[in-house]
Image: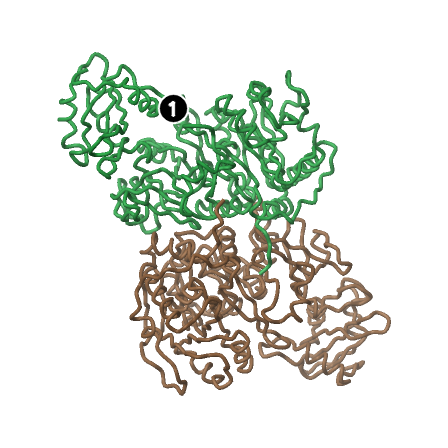
Chain colours: A green, B brown
Amino acid sequence: MMDYPLLLRTFLIRTAKYFSKKEIVSVYPEGVFRYDYGSYYKRVCRLAHALKSLGIRRGDRVASVALNDHRHLELYFGVPCYGAVLHTVNFRLPAHHLAYIINHAEDRVIFVDEDLLMFVELVKDQLKTVEKFVVLSHTGKMPQTSIQNIVLYDDLIRDFPDEYDFPTDLNENDPAMICYTSATTGDPKGVVYSHRAIVLHSLTVGITFGAGESDCILHIVPMFHANAWCAPFAGLIAACKQVLPGREVINMEKLCRTIADEKVTFTAGVPTIWMLLYDYLEKGGWHDFSSLRTIVSGGAAIPRTLLETFNEKYGFPIKQAYGATETTPLVSAAIPKSYMADLSRDELYDIRTSVGIVVMGLEMKLVNTEGKEARMDGKEWGEIWLRGPWIASEYYKDPERSKEAFADGWYHTGDVATMDSEGYVRLVDRTKDLVKSAGEWISSVDLENTIMGHPKVAEAAIIGVPHPKWQERPLACVTVAAGQSVTADELKDYLKDKVKASWWIPDDFVFLPEIPKTSVGKFNKRELRRLYAEGELKPAEVA
Amino acid sequence: MMDYPLLLRTFLIRTAKYFSKKEIVSVYPEGVFRYDYGSYYKRVCRLAHALKSLGIRRGDRVASVALNDHRHLELYFGVPCYGAVLHTVNFRLPAHHLAYIINHAEDRVIFVDEDLLMFVELVKDQLKTVEKFVVLSHTGKMPQTSIQNIVLYDDLIRDFPDEYDFPTDLNENDPAMICYTSATTGDPKGVVYSHRAIVLHSLTVGITFGAGESDCILHIVPMFHANAWCAPFAGLIAACKQVLPGREVINMEKLCRTIADEKVTFTAGVPTIWMLLYDYLEKGGWHDFSSLRTIVSGGAAIPRTLLETFNEKYGFPIKQAYGATETTPLVSAAIPKSYMADLSRDELYDIRTSVGIVVMGLEMKLVNTEGKEARMDGKEWGEIWLRGPWIASEYYKDPERSKEAFADGWYHTGDVATMDSEGYVRLVDRTKDLVKSAGEWISSVDLENTIMGHPKVAEAAIIGVPHPKWQERPLACVTVAAGQSVTADELKDYLKDKVKASWWIPDDFVFLPEIPKTSVGKFNKRELRRLYAEGELKPAEVA
């Protein structure tokens, strides 16, 4: 067989040539912009010439700080097909992290959305490698700015030819994209995606969710978030119509109008968006979901009642999926098997609220505390380990942290889960949040939810604290409900017949006026551990 | 990203582990055999142990002379995942070719269907490398045979363990399968398929035809014919139910019963089978095609009226596709685009009778007589050139003939075609059957069909004959209809306003009692050229 590399170029050219009339649509507050793959390709070619004119060499990193629109989609193919690497920047990171990742990636140019310029202005004096700023503007006006060496994207590319000879001599393992995880501790970690990984991942996405030429994809997932789950790549490869909602993604009325007007069949997003949509719908918001066929939800667990309501009340068929920045990102999808049609409603939702079965092309194993593969019984816990052609093998320029996560040829996800006899995986906890008592795991999430079931408890967070005999024991940090009082013994009694084993019951309870939280509202266990280490958390018998 | 090879092993293990209950069905004259992927996998593991016990090494060739059943499907994965190469032998070849390909491939073992043993017995004394014969028997009885060193497959694998540690250190470019084309001239030519090519091709088949876990595939294409178009691979990868009809494939009543009983959704085959089916249906044969979703037809053009009748009268939705042994084989598929719903019935059948648009992952160009890419106008002719990860780069151990077909990094198919503005390709002729007059191509097929439109003509075959000024000119070999007489001038007159240009009209006509035919009933142009070279074809004015 030919030694023919898997490059994005092949797919870009095929779609531009044979599906030139298929549409790409950007939704802006002022109205809708639409063009077709034929026109798209011409601008991608102009972009490649522009990159050359800026002196960008093969392998150089180029950043996008942008919302979801057709210009960002031009960068998605133009930059990698040219031979450079697109760094999709998460502008929601704290400023010091924003500066860190741009410097760490050594980005030479920043393509920045006119609406997001302020994020770049905030850090511009800390940037060490950026030579040029290019403004992605749909209004066509250069915004007021103190940044020097800045140009409008449309001006930059305008005068170049609309044909470009995209290189065929790239290696399929050459980098195409780079993305940083929003690390909970330390600096963000970079993951580099190759052409090969993106192509293989995109083909698998297409088969897993049955996406084809007749589909119209609405991009709700931000394009800085793990390649927008590769939907822009899978969409172009299958010659789908693509709809990019920009900042209107959080305008639920506009989103619902767009779904109906553009006859969207496929979309994907995080539960945060589905919560916004749920509120809008429950208030009687207008919608017509008749065109929708598949909705993928990932990034966090979707509550079962929400899934049920969406499916049954609104005909909004959500499929849960699982992945990570390190996995390009698709790992598994919760799709019932064809022979499961006779299952009860409850059994089907058990499956649909799992994170699903590992997709074709990857290998998954759940590794228990003894380093062995956990049984497929839906009960035994194991850390999810992964390997496959779109699983990262390292963090970019970070050998120390790479060593931990990518040992023995597998990516250790840090997620602990069960797998049932049909292969469906259910997440239990993060390894770092598990308490390891006498060599056995205790799930902090399980224990917290059980304690929070007590009527007098408002919030409960569990951390593992060192113990001379059992290595670690769970410490419960509890906030009581307004106007209530409770004793540690009362809670221990309450837990007796509710926890998996008696040794799950915390020996000690700390009563706090408030549990410290992270910026996104999760329990800040790191802070709790720090407070414990400094002797600030004192167990008490009564609150 | 991880350096993780594309091997069939990954997909085999995933389907066996997570879709172990999905069925595989073999249909025999005596009845139906069924088991599941869980049991399938155990036998594939036993087979791997058996190959080891036979001393088969990595890269060794192992032949199958077999019909479509579950044992053949075990070989399809067992042999390549073990690290050896499965040579699927076309037992319909003439005996000297059968012996040639087995010797040329240096097959060490032959797995032979009990019903096909006679084909092997015919050539057994000519075989130079075969050490062992293994009989694939569904009756469980060793047939009467003079062959020594022969064993029943089920006996061979029975006592081995049902787990096998399939190698992970194969290279994805290592050979998995080998198949020989039934050459029209000279010895058959071998094409070797790598794990990588098969995996990428199978994923693309899945997206192109929308095949997923809920599909049930009926394998009509013989498994010796270009990997059965990779449907067994694509089917296992997507965890489809698979149905293998064995010799019952030509029993139309049984085939129709099987489609209904097993709820077949997807099948593929050559027009020969569809003609048999058509006859059966037109005679009022029982059928229920309500489960069928996709039928792929390839290997030869399907007549338009047949396609129309199948679609409209019988609800049998045929999609035409194009490929070759050299292309694994899928190259293009004739699927109307989603925005073509408003086309007229005629326009839609124009598309459905084309060979379609090149599939994702491949590059196609039509190269005209000047060596340039033909226009996408539906008119200009060009030879189809292909490149991509599942296109062959050579014939096995045949540098001489490889040089011709695989020049400049492209596979030269020898098929001349047009491509319209939407990318749909229509075949015109084989390059070797075109007449090249003054540097311009004349289609022998077109010209023959036009001449055969004359009421007094029964058959017409065109060959190109050397000409001192125009390089080549068309010579018409004509058989007149029973009891008729016709003159050369009459025919020239008739053609005047029917051919593309006046220089298409043959200068000379040869009248023959019969046109020589090949074994499959096509005009034997090779024989006509030989007769012409030997002065046996004399132009005449009247017949």
Q: Quadrant of residue A311?
A: top left
Q: Residue at x 39, y 74 (%)?
A: B54
Residue at the disc numbered 1:
A279
Viewer can see residue B277: no
User: Residue B443, how many percent across, how many down?
Assistant: 72, 66
Q: Residue at x 61, y 62 (%)?
A: B393
Q: Is residue B381 left or right of residue B133?
A: right
Viewer can see residue A322: yes
Q: Residue furthest bottom?
A: B146
Q: Label 1 amino acid?
A: Asp
Q: Quadrant of residue A434?
A: top left
Q: Is residue A361 above or below residue B179?
A: above
Q: Is residue A470 left or right of residue B498?
A: left
How many marks can you see?
A: 1
User: Residue B198, how many percent across, how many down?
Assistant: 50, 59
User: Residue A392, how many percent across, how many down?
Assistant: 47, 42
Q: Foreground residue, A425 or B204?
A: A425
Q: Is residue A380 above or below residue B275?
A: above
Q: Residue furthest front?
A: A468
Q: Residue at x 72, y 81 (%)?
A: B530
